[in-house]
Every structure is written in C-alpha cells, then in structure tokens.
Image (cartoon, rainbow, N blue to C red):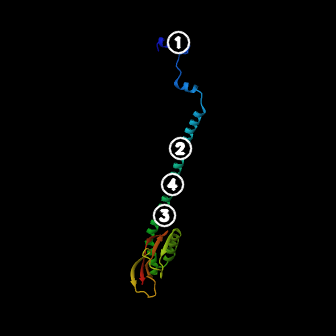
Amino acid sequence: MSDETNDAAAADVEDGAAEAPADTTAADAPVTVEDLVVALEAVTAERDQHLADLQRVSAEFQNFRKQTEKRNSEFAAQAGSRVAEALLPVLDACDAAAQQGVEGVEPIAGQLRGELERAGLQVIAEIDAAFDPNLHEAAMSEPGDDDQDGPIVAQVLRTGYAWNGRVLRAAMVKVKG
C-alpha cells in the first residue's frame, strides 16, 4: 500500500468518518414485537416443513424396509421351493425302488420326505378325494357311480407335491366319474 492510502485511512478513523457496515445500522434500530412475531412465524414454518420432510422420509424408509423384508422372504421361499423341486426325482426313485422291493430304501425315503415336510412340502396323493384340476392331472378316467357328486380320484399314478401351498407338481391320477 502506498503511504497516501494509509494516511487517508488513518484520517478517516480519527475523524470517525469511516462508514459502518450496512447490516450494523439495521441492528441499531429497535426491535419491535411485530418483527419478533414475524421471525417466530418464519422459524415455526421452517420447523414444520422440516418435521413434515422427516415424517415423509421416515414413512418411505418404513415402506422400503417392509418391501425388502417381503422380497427377502419370497426369495428364501423360492430357493426352498427350487431345492424341494430338485429333490422330487429322488423321492420318485425311492418310491419306485420300494415298489420293486429293494430293501433299505424306505427308511431313507421316509427321512427325506419327513424333513421336506417339516420345511413346507405337502404330499398330494389322496384317493377318493374330489378331483381338483389345480392339484391333479387326469391321466386316465373310468365311469363313476350315479350317486357321485363329481369326479373323484380313484388311483394315484404319480404323487404330487406342493411347497407352502404352491403346487410344485400336480398329482397324476386316474379319475372316476
């Protein structure tokens, strides 16, 4: 800085002629109750807006968490269903071996079927049950009695299975009626 500039600044300070910042003049003015009420209303409105935003974000997060939990449980159920469906040929082979008289197969098949049933597998193989096209696949039919209400399962040709209420494989049956 030059000496002239320093001298001019010093002269202004000594004379009290230096300009005050613009916002200090507003602070020197007396604060009225109306100004405070307006400021309070503005702060209250801002607080209410932040509270509404927080509640909205919290609700969205709760919905996201519920959807994620539902999606994860559906995924786990589908994974279990796929494993059970992959094991159905093993159960069929065990049943066929037992029908052929192979010894030692029935305990293994029973244990496998028992574990799968505890996990959610249901066997569809009821004889004399009403025919349900959602649960049964009619492979053969024979005439029924006149006093029958509708077709019934006369013989199960291949066992059907459901996993937690969803049919994995329909039972192949012979229908009477």
Q: Quadrant of residue 170?
A: bottom left
Q: Return the disc, 1 or 3, that comes first in the chain's sequence.
A: 1
Residue at point 56%, 36% (across, down): 38
Q: Return the disc, 4 or 3, that comes first in the chain's sequence.
A: 4
Mark in the foreground, 2 or 4: 2
Against 32, is 17 above or below?
Answer: above
Percent position (x, y) of residue 34? 58, 34
Q: Nearer the viewer, residue 50 or 157?
A: 50
The residues tagged by marks 2 and 4 sit, at their Cα atoms, a distance apart of: 21 Å
Tag 1 residue: 11
The residues tagged by marks 3 and 2 sit, at their Cα atoms, a distance apart of: 42 Å
- Quadrant (top left/top right/bottom left/bottom right) for the C terminus: bottom left
Specify few, some or many for label 4: CA neighbours under 10 Å numbering under 14, 14-19, or 20 or more.
few
Tag 3 residue: 77
Residue at point 53%, 46% (across, down): 52
Q: Amino acid at mark 1?
A: Ala
Q: Nearer the viewer, residue 27 or 168?
A: 27
Tag 2 residue: 49
Q: Dots 4 and 1: beta carbons under 8 Å?
A: no
Mark in the foreground, 1 or 2: 2
Specify few, some or many for label 3: CA neighbours under 10 Å numbering under 14, 14-19, or 20 or more.
some
Point out which mark residue 170 bears. none
Q: Return the disc, 4 or 1, that comes first in the chain's sequence.
A: 1
Q: Amino acid at mark 3?
A: Ala
The residues tagged by marks 4 and 1 sit, at their Cα atoms, a distance apart of: 69 Å
Percent position (x, y) of residue 121? 49, 70
Point out which mark residue 63 bears. 4
Q: Amino acid at mark 4?
A: Asn
Q: Nearer the viewer, residue 38 or 101?
A: 38
Q: Amino acid at mark 2?
A: Gln
Q: Secondary structure at mark 1?
A: helix
